[in-house]
Amino acid sequence: MKRCTLTVFMIALFVNNNSIFAQVASRFDVLITEIFADASPSFGLPPNEFVEIKNVSASSYNLKDWKLSDGSSTATISINYVLQPDSLVIICMNSAVSNFSSFGNAIGVANFPSLDNDEDLIFLLSKDGITLHAVKYNKSWYQNDLKANGGWTLEMFDTKNPCAGINNWKASIDPKGGTPGKNNSVNGINKDDMPPSLVRAFAIDSVTVIAVFDETVDSLAASFASRYRLDKNIDKAVHAIPVRPLFTEVVLIFSNPLAVNTIYTLIVSEITDCAGNVINTNNQSNTGLSSTADTFDVVINEIFFNPKSDGFDFVELYNKSKKIVDLQHLYIANRNSTGVLDNIKQLSVIPYLFFPGDYIVITENTRWLSQNYSVKNIDNLLQLPTLPSFPDDKGTIIVANQQGKIIEEILYDSKWHFALLNSHEGISLERIDYSAPTQNKNNWGSAASTAGFATPGYQNSQFMADPQMNGMILVNPTIFSPDNDGFDDRATISYQIATPGHVANMTIFDASGRLVRYLVKNATLGLQGNFRWDGLDDKMQQLPVGIYIVFTEVFNLRGKTKKFKNVVTLARKF
């Protein structure tokens, strides 16, 4: 009886084990949940890189012959290891297994991918070749500048939201620097309710367009060619091929060819993300076939070379041509002491289209720039690992095409800043006229204080649209009531001037000629802008109803002064 029972048990165990070994994992059944890319300095973790994976399904999987890859090197799990539901395992190099054994279950592999500190792609493949999960991280994912310098892991926040990228990852808050083999320290709920967006598209030949999305899309939904359409009689795609392992790009094949330098609009419908959200309003992108940039097709339009101590330089380019330019074929550089091109940096390692009339800002930290200056379109910012050196006093900036031809160059000087500024720190130099010579110092001016001292990615505050424009000051509404009812609560004082390089003082007087508010003091002006008056005096006290005079004095360094008087009535409801 015992022998029979034992035989039945062994048969059941054999069948059960073989059924486990035969399980085929589906996408997102097993996830990458923690990444240790920069192991120095150590706060308690071993000084070895690792990747943690978690089984979030209801099935068990034998990890033998599964692979971990970064695209250039691939590690294969060579042992039988059954990962149970809701279980974690650490994957590291063979020599580091003993170091991680006290933290949790660990598997050593030969050829463990070297994880780049700044940016890398890591993905997990089943033995059947299914991409279970892919993560393309960068330093901004830490969301903590100190921890991004090393010694801390990146942890996934919510395993039910595996495709959300930076929105679902952050630096570990565990005192040791990470939680290998255990639930993440930032574990929680982070539901994805946002639909995917089409962020850009580029043509690689006359019939092939690549659509790029802001997050991983459902590969089945993305494979229907009829869901992609180009305007100008190109019509629907005939093939759609989602690109592994991230599935953030789709290769589209069209039967009708595209013309060079013609801007087309790609329109996408019915594409879903991993959470099932359907693409909505952000479903269109310009695209087209690019051509080679020539001299002055692209100009340097704004230079930020003297940031505050915690800041980063930037250079803004403007496409003044009628060409579609691929930033993959543009380079930024400067010159060394002997005049030779130095510190040459490619603007993009992948195709990135720059359309006529568009701006692009090149910087080392788009996050810092967005936090410290007004950025109206984040898509106009491009982050590079490093920029050439741009000294605070003077220096060169060069833009060259893929043939090495210089298409734009400037030798800038901090003396080009507005002379009355006490400091140039944190203030950009703006180009006044796209068509005027780049090297003409009179074609540059300090970004206006009214624009926040820089205009990254949009029209300069000192841009000269019409040199014949007359200066004027307007107040609207002429009767306002600061009673916080949402209707005419403030008086808006708008200005327009013909040329850059002006400063304004603005004061408010009552009907008896008494000064009641010094509204603006020595504000450097753009060519247009506005100020607001809330009906308060200099002590932030309410002023009585009545007629007031807005007196504005505008002057420049050439001794020209213009004065304006505007009448405004302050009223209140009784």
Image (cartoon, rainbow, N blue to C red):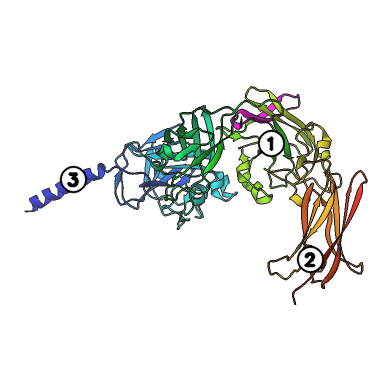
Dots 1, 2 in contact, CB < 8 A: no
The residue carrying mark 3 is 15
Q: At which x and y percent is residue 231?
A: 53, 36
The three-letter code of the residue at mark 2 reads Ile
482 left or right, relative to 375: right
Q: Which mark is residue 434?
A: none
Q: Is residue 128 shown to the viewer in this render?
A: yes
- Image quadrant occupied by the C terminus: bottom right
Q: Which mark is residue 317?
A: 1
Residue 566: image quadrant is bottom right
Q: Earlier in the sequence, mark 1 or mark 3?
A: 3
Q: Is residue 245 above or below residue 56?
A: above
Crowding near the residue tagged with mark 3, few <14, some 14–19, many ≥20 C-alpha atoms within 10 Å: few
Q: Earlier in the sequence, mark 2 or mark 3?
A: 3
The three-letter code of the residue at mark 1 reads Leu
The three-letter code of the residue at mark 3 reads Val
Q: Is 28 in front, or is 116? A: 28
Q: Earlier in the sequence, mark 1 or mark 2?
A: 1
The residue carrying mark 2 is 479
Q: Is residue 337 above or below residue 117?
A: above
**Disc 2 from disc 3: Cα separation:** 86 Å
Q: Total marks drawn? A: 3
399 left or right, relative to 241: right
Q: Which residues are magenta?
A: 321-344
Q: Is 166 in front, or is 464? A: 464
Q: At which x and y percent is residue 423?
A: 81, 47
Q: Secondary structure at mark 1?
A: strand
